[in-house]
Amino acid sequence: MADETGGERAARSAPPARIAAAGFRSRARRAVSASGPPTHAFGARRRGSGMSVQAERDVLDVVLRTGEALLGTGAGVADVTVAMQRMAAGLGMSGCQIDITFNSITISLDREDGALTRVRVLEVRTSDYSRLAEVLELVDDVAAGHVALTDAIARLDAIVAAPHPYRRWVVTAALGLMAAGVAVLLGGGWQVAGLAALTTGVIDRALRFLRHRGLPYLFQQAVGSAIATAVAVVLLWGVGRMGWDIAVLPPSLVVASGIVVLLAGLSLVGAAQDAISGFPLTAAGRSFEVALLTLGIVIGVGVVLDVGARMGVPLSISDLDAFAPPLAVQIAGAAVVSGSFAVASYTRMRTVPLVALIGGVGTAVNGTLAAVGVGPAARAFAAALVVGVLAGVLARRRTAPAMVLTVCGITPMLPGLAIYGAMYAIVESGSTLSGATLTLQAVAVGIALAAGVSLGDFVARTTRAQADRWQTALHRRARGTRI
C-alpha cells in the first residue's frame, strides 16, 4: 500500500465538524466568486496598427483636424469623440485615445517606441451647420471604407476652405425674419413683427461691428439686449407723449423677440448632451458659458429699464400670456423662426423646410399641452422630446445631423419673454420674489428643452437597427459605472 500524503493523513485525522466547515467555506466561495471577466477593463495592452510611423502621424493629424472642425462648428463633445474614433478606425487605426476639454482636443496613439500625441486648441466656436454636415458626411464615408487617407485629407481641406453658402447680409435678413416670427408667435401683429425685424437687424450689425473690434461676448450680449430694451423704452415714451396705442405695439414683445434671437446661439443643448453622455467637465464649462452669456442679456435689459425708470418713462409690461395667438398662428410662426435660424446658421437650403416642419411640430405639441393646463417646464420637455425623436429618426437618412434639427427645432420655445418679465419685476416693481420666480421659470424651461431633446435623441439612437461599436461604447459611458 502506497504511503499516504501529509494532507490525506491530516484530513483523515481531522474531526468531522472541521471537515464539514471546510466544505461549507469552499461551497460559499464558489457561490459568491465571479468567474467571468470584469465589467470594466482597465490598463489594456497597446494594440499596434501595423502602419508606418509616417502613416500613423498622417492619420492622427487628419482625425484631429476633423474633430476641431466638428467642435468649432457646433457639435457636442460626445458626437465629436465618436466621429473621431470612427474615422480613425476607418483609416486603419483603432487604438487611439481621445480627450476633449472645453477648448482643446488631444489624440494619442500608444506605440512600442513611444506614444504619438497631437493637441489642438480651439480658438472659436460658432454655428456653421452646412460645414458641420459636410464634415460628418466625410466621417461616414471614411468609416465605411469608401475614402482613402489622401482623399480624406483633400476633402477636409476643401470643406474648411469653402465659402459660406450665403452672404452675410442674408444672415442679417434671416435673423430679422426670425425676430418677426417670434413676435407673431407671441401674438404681435404686423407692426410688431416689422419693428422686431428692424430692431434685430440693427442689433446684428452692431454686434458684428463690436465683434470685429474684439469686444468680449458677454458685453456683446449686454449691448444687444440693451438695444432691444431701448426700443421698448422709446415705444413706452411714445405712448405717453405721442398717444401711440400700446395694444398695437406692445413693447414687451419687441424686447422678447430680440432676447430669443440672442438666446438662440447659445449651446444649452450641447451642454446637456455632454452631461448626459458622460462628459461632465466639458458640460460644466459649456453650462457656465451659457449662464454667463445669459447674464449679459439680463444686465443689458436691467440697465436700460433702470435708466428708463429714472427718466420718468412710464414703464409697463403686459401679462405674459395676454397675447397668445391661435395655435395655427403659433405653428406658422414657429416654422418661420426655426427655418430662419437655420439659414442664419448656414444650414443647407434643402434642410431648411425640414427644420421648419420640426419646429412647427414641437410648437404644436407645446401649444396643445398648454391648452389643457400643463405647466411651462413640463410641456417644454414633452415638446423637446418629440423634436429630439423626430430629429434622431430623420438624421438616419443622412438628411442632416440630428443636432442641427434639434437646436433649430426648439428655438421657438426659448423663454425670452419670461426673462424680460423677470427683469421688469425686479427693476421696476421692486418685486425681487416675483422676479426670482420668473427667472427660475425661464431656467426650468431652458433645462427642460435641453433634457427633452437629449432624451429624444437617445431614444432615437437606441432604436437604430445597427449601432457601431463606438456608439455602443458611448452608451456604456453614459449609463455610468454602478452596474
Image (spheres, rainbow, N blue to C red):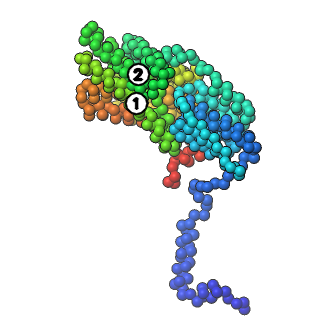
How far across and how far down the image is residue 388, in percent?
A: 50, 33
**Mark drawn on residue 341:** none
Residue 224 tag number: 2
Tell me if 63 is positioned left or right of 183 in this view: right
First along the sequence among labels 1 and 2: 2
| Residue at mark 1 to residue at mark 2: CA–CA distance | 11 Å
The amino acid sitting under disc 1 is Thr
- Is the residue marked by circle 2 packed among few (<14), some (14-19), or many (20+) residues within 10 Å? many
The percent coordinates of residue 18 (x first, y second) are 53, 83
User: Where is mark 1, residue-wise?
Assistant: 294
In the current view of this chain or complex, which residue is farthest to the top?
242
- Residue 164: where, in percent of width, then height? 59, 20
Q: Which residue is drawn at 51% across and 54% down?
A: 483
Q: In the shown orientation, is residue 197 left or right of residue 357?
A: left
Answer yes or no: is residue 119 visible. yes
Image quadrant containing the N terminus: bottom right
Residue depicted at 68% across the width and 42% down the height: 89
Residue drawn at (53%, 71%), measured in percent from left and top? 28
Q: In this view, does 65 lie to the left or right of 293?
A: right
